[in-house]
Amino acid sequence: MVRFLWNLVVTVVAAAVGLLLTALILGDEDFSMNFNGFIWAVLIFVVAQAILSPFILKLSVKYASALTGGVALVSTFVALLLANIFSDGLSIGTITGWLLGTVLVWLLSAIAGWILPAVFLKNKLEDRKDK
């Protein structure tokens, strides 16, 4: 149960970091985040990503196996689309925003998802050494 909760926290924080950094990199014209709806945008994005990834993977294996490697990008795009539609926290206004936004959110969320556990584990190990 603790591992599940930890993975959930890392996923939500990584998605938030990916969305925020993408908004900072691309700017308001292409990819803007609204502070008031940010939490909803992140939650919609994370839930959509969690539901869509296995579904899109299954479809790609069945109908287009060559696209299996792009499942994460496709599910990121669709999750961004849903967050854009169903929340006031995210607004993607241009083709550049959709294309670069998808790649940046995917990449930055993945990097944050790798770094966060490493930092946390390093701190936990240091705490144990100090005791």
Image (cartoon, rainbow, N blue to C red):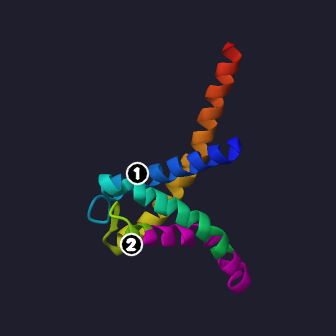
**Is residue 81 found left or right of 49 in the rendered image?**
left
Residue where numbered disc 1 is placed: 21
The amino acid type, in three-letter code, at marker 1 is: Leu
The amino acid type, in three-letter code, at marker 2 is: Ile
- Locate residue 81: give its quadrant: bottom left
| Residue at position x 65%, y 27% in the image | 124
x then y, percent, for residue 61: 72, 79
| Of labels 1 and 2, the one closer to you | 2
| Residue at position x 27%, y 60% in the image | 28
Mark 2 neighbour density, 10 Å: few (under 14) some (14–19) many (20 or more): some
Quadrant holding the N terminus: top right
x then y, percent, for residue 29: 26, 65
**What residue range appears in magenta?**
58-82
| Residue at position x 37%, y 55% in the image | 38
Q: Secondary structure at mark 1?
A: helix
x then y, percent, for residue 71: 62, 71
Q: Say whether residue 80 is magenta.
A: yes
Q: Main secondary structure of the magenta part?
A: helix
Residue where numbered disc 2 is placed: 85
Vertical position of residue 35 compared to residue 48: above or below? above
Q: Residue furthest bottom?
A: 63
Q: Say whether residue 78 is magenta.
A: yes
Counting the numbered discs, the total is 2
Quadrant holding the C terminus: top right
